[in-house]
Amino acid sequence: MPDKTAALSGIASQPAEAAAIQNSLDTVRERLGMEVAYLSEFVDERAVFRAVSAPGLEALIQPSQSMDLREVYCKHILDGGLPRLMPDTSAHAIATDLPITQMIPIGSHLSVPVHRPDGSVFGMFCFLSRTPRPDLNDEALALVETHSALVSTRLALAPDA
């Protein structure tokens, strides 16, 4: 079985920190009943997947893969075009227009930014399901925001990052 925390080694200060980040992803994904969870880092206009929790869907997304920020929800959420919580992505024109929505498909999505100590955005803490999830609510968003803040404290960033 591959080491799920290997892609985190460059951003987490110690193996225990990387394991804690992975555990946060796994725990929140399971608690919310979502199919895919990931921590991304924004690098040169790309979302680089640093940690992934997607049992049975590893062919869709793996640590160290990347996608153009224009092709994923992250940039649109940060720009205010999409909300952080989307129980049904079909209710949002920007989401339905993105090819990734049909490709996976993405029926529901929940994502919040992860910040560096200086307040800048490191990347996103994201959860998705292939079907709409009308049960997702502000409580689910609060859970993701709490874990995103915990992940932020665990990241070890280079001084110039």
Image (cartoon, rainbow, N blue to C red):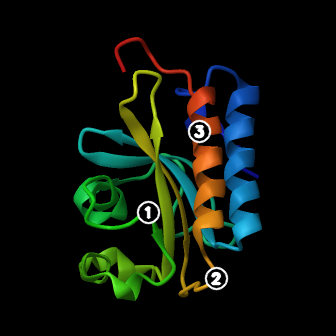
Which residue sits at x=54%, y=82%?
A: 130
Give the quarter of the image for residue 17. top right
Percent x, y of residue 4 = 68, 46
Is residue 75 depicted above or below 150 in this figure? below
> Which corner quadrant holds the C terminus?
top left
Percent x, y of residue 56 = 68, 73
Is residue 88 depicted above or below 154 in this figure? below
Percent x, y of residue 158 = 44, 16
Q: Which numbered marker is on residue 135?
A: 2
Q: What residue type is labelled 2?
A: Asp
Q: Earlier in the sequence, mark 3 or mark 1?
A: 1
Marks 1/2: CA–CA distance: 15 Å
Percent x, y of residue 134 = 58, 86
Q: Residues within 10 Å of mark 1 (few under 14, many from 20)?
A: many
Q: Is residue 38 visible?
A: yes
Between 77 and 21, the one nearer to me in the picture: 77
Q: In this view, does 83 lie to the left or right of 133?
A: left
Q: Which numbered marker is on residue 84?
A: 1
Q: Which amino acid does label 3 sit on?
A: Ala
Marks 3/1: CA–CA distance: 15 Å
Which residue sits at x=58%, y=67%?
A: 138
Give the quarter of the image for residue 42. top left
Instruction: For mark 1, give the secondary structure.
Output: loop
Q: Name the residue under label 3.
A: 149
Q: What residue type is labelled 1?
A: Arg
How many marks do you count on the picture?
Answer: 3
Furthest residue toward front: 138
Q: In this view, does 12 lie to the left or right of 124?
A: right
